[in-house]
Amino acid sequence: MGKPIIEVHGITKRYQLGELGALSLRDAVEHGFRRLIGRGDGQPRRGEFWALNGVTFDVQPGEVIGLIGKNGAGKSTLLKILSRITEPTSGEAILRGRLASLLEVGTGFHPELSGRENVFLNGAILGMTRKEIARKFDEIVDFAEIENFIDTPVKRYSSGMYVRLAFAVAAHLEPEILIVDEVLAVGDAEFQKKCISRMETISTRDQRTILFVSHNITAVRRLCSKCIVMVKGKSSEVLPVEKAVEIYTQDQKVSALSVELAERARHSKQGRVGRILRIEVTSPSGELRYGEPGTVDVTFHLKEAVKEIAVGLGFDTPDGQRALTLDTDTAGHTWSLSAGNHTVRIGLAFWSTHPGNYTVSAALICGHNYFDTVGNAAVWEVQTSKFDNVSDRGFGGCRPKPTVELFPTVEPHRALAVL
Amino acid sequence: MNALSENFNIRIRPRRSLWEVDWRGIFDYRDLLFLLVRRDFISKYKQTVLGPAWMLIQPLATTVVFTIIFSNVAKISTDSTPPVLFYMGGLLTWNLFSQNLGGSGNVLQANAGMFGKVYFPRIIIPLANGISALIPFAIQLALFLAIYILISWTSPGGFRPSIGPQLLLLPLFVLQAALVGLGSALIFSSMTAVYRDLQYVLGFLVQIWMYLTPIIMPVSQFPTKWRWLVLLNPMTAPVEGTRWALLGTGTLSPVTVAQSWGISLALFIAGFLWFNKIERSFVDRA
């Protein structure tokens, strides 16, 4: 084997904790003044946080590497550094090829410009030359399935067309290294299939290197030959997939039954209207037990009055499969609420997920939009209980009480005889 | 892939020196620069009824307003030049400058979303804006020349055009205006990245700067006590110099021009380096 295509040596990244990185002028003047009169230490003292704390690995050309880890383990910081959006605090990485990411499709799309003009502009932003884009133009339009609209301003596109075109540009970049970050959540099922097969083509036919970042262990198992696990800002070596999944699963420790979410990192665009503050198990038994009544309280803050808001909870198995979704609007409950804090209690009379650990996510929903989402908000264990007489038979995912009826079966020849 | 990428090595590490500039990256993204200039032009004028005519209407309107208020009402001298030509000549380079400063003075905040998602040398955006600003400049220059010819033909024995070899120096003043505009935009957007509230200052900074520049009145009309301040202003030479190159009027010595160029270059280099430093960590602040 030749030289690795990605070499990462001891990368670290330090962030200053605190309100915001950008100071207000008033802060600066105040601190300057304090220093001048000799009171206080001058510098606004804030804590620091090592998002990455020694990341080292090598990736060989043509490999499809899964990058897994809990939220906050440093995956996205690492990707930001590899795609040169931000600088490491120390350490070094060498890329022997162009790198492009499918992290963000449609960056730099301008609504007034036509699809054609946007393909060129977006391609150039992603690092292609005009010549390259011109060569692949027909292929891109074909992939996006928008031939008839290519000269229409993209502001008239449906959101589906928009995403398809954006993804098509990114998918035809042909970089030597491609980063894919769960972008496959976009588009309809048909298009998702197309994206996955495009990824497979890129890796097998074109021998490109892919870094696939995902919580979905099934997808990682399917696509990746090897894996890197990140735990608390440190990375593992490049490991066999199963070994990596094992480490990842162990890292998913059970969290407290009441989880504060107010202090999480800001997510772009989300959380401006409403923000989830806390999720808490409030069952009569004090925990979630299979077969017993179970309730979870979701507390959130609204900055303004909203109409038709709904709350949702999701329970995923440690390898990323959804086991249970509880949305209040499924039960026909949405509310018009004033600004301020509110708590919604969601529950099941018969808690039906199988005993085991679940990764819990929460969302504030309004129609098709999310005001706020928290993936991996907590890992909660569903306990066994006296109703659980089945878990010895193996994992059952979600096991609610089914409706059951037994019909006496009449054997065919007897039935004929009756006639 | 092409031969270029065979040994395409990207090295990622903390940049140590202030002087470490990604020249090659800037060169590699030249196509993006071109496409951004095109985007600016198309998106600005595609949806407007009058299209590129706005590039003429805006400076014409300003000139008319200035002529009425400052020349006819306030009776401020224009150095024996017809007021319309005086104001228009001054506004030529001033508009180029203010399009640079106004358009790029907040470039980091305005593009924070995009900069957080994809890498390219950030300087490309202000550069594209600066090049875009040359288009209205060229159109305004043509308009100016048309009016110039019209006035010298129609005014009997009054104003005589004195276009001469000094016209060759016009590009020098145009370039200087663009440099000062871009340089101060880079400084300003770097400051805004650290002290966010400065973005509200941008609008009136441009306005105040204009009053310290000989646009409404020539340098000769500023009180002698304050003339040094006006000459220190790096926009004085481009504005006064453009009038001199086109109309043959004004108070500028070669020493003043050289001094002013020195200040302009220093401003630009400082802005360029500061911006280059800030762009590396900007995403972490936003």
Image (cartoon, coloured by chain):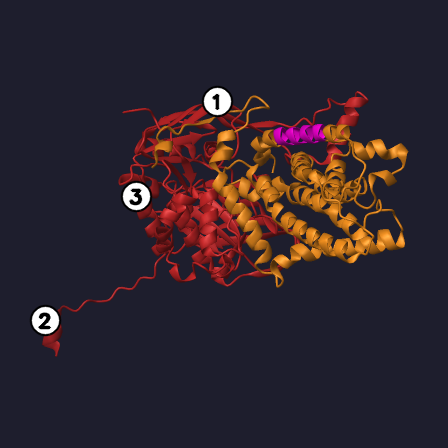
Chain colours: A red, B orange
Looking at the image, the residue that sits furthest to the bottom is A419
Q: Looking at the image, can residue A338 be seen?
A: no
Crowd tier of the residue under label 1, counting other residues whose Cα lies within 10 Å: few below 14, some 14–19, many 20 or above = some
**In the image, is residue B263 part of the stretch drawn in magenta?**
yes
Q: Earlier in the sequence, mark 3 or mark 1?
A: 1
Compare marks 1 and 2 and give the one earlier in the sequence.
1
Label 2, secondary structure: give it: helix
Q: Which mark is residue A413?
A: 2
Counting from the top left corner in percent of width and height, residue A30 is at 77, 30
- Residue A118's place in the image compared with A5, above or below, is below
Region in magenta: B261-274
Residue name at image x 55 percent, y 24 percent: B20
Q: Name the N-terminal-most of marks 2 and 3.
A: 3
Q: Quadrant of residue A46?
A: top right
The amino acid at mark 3 is Glu
Q: Position of residue B286 (x, y in %)?
A: 60, 38
The picture quadrant where one finds residue B187 is top right
**Labels 1, 2: front one:** 1
| Front residue (pair A154, A411) | A154
At horizontal 41% and vertical 48% (from top left) the residue drawn is A169
Give me the C-alpha separation between circle 3 and circle 1: 32 Å
Q: Between residue B85 and residue A407, name the one nearer to us.
A: B85
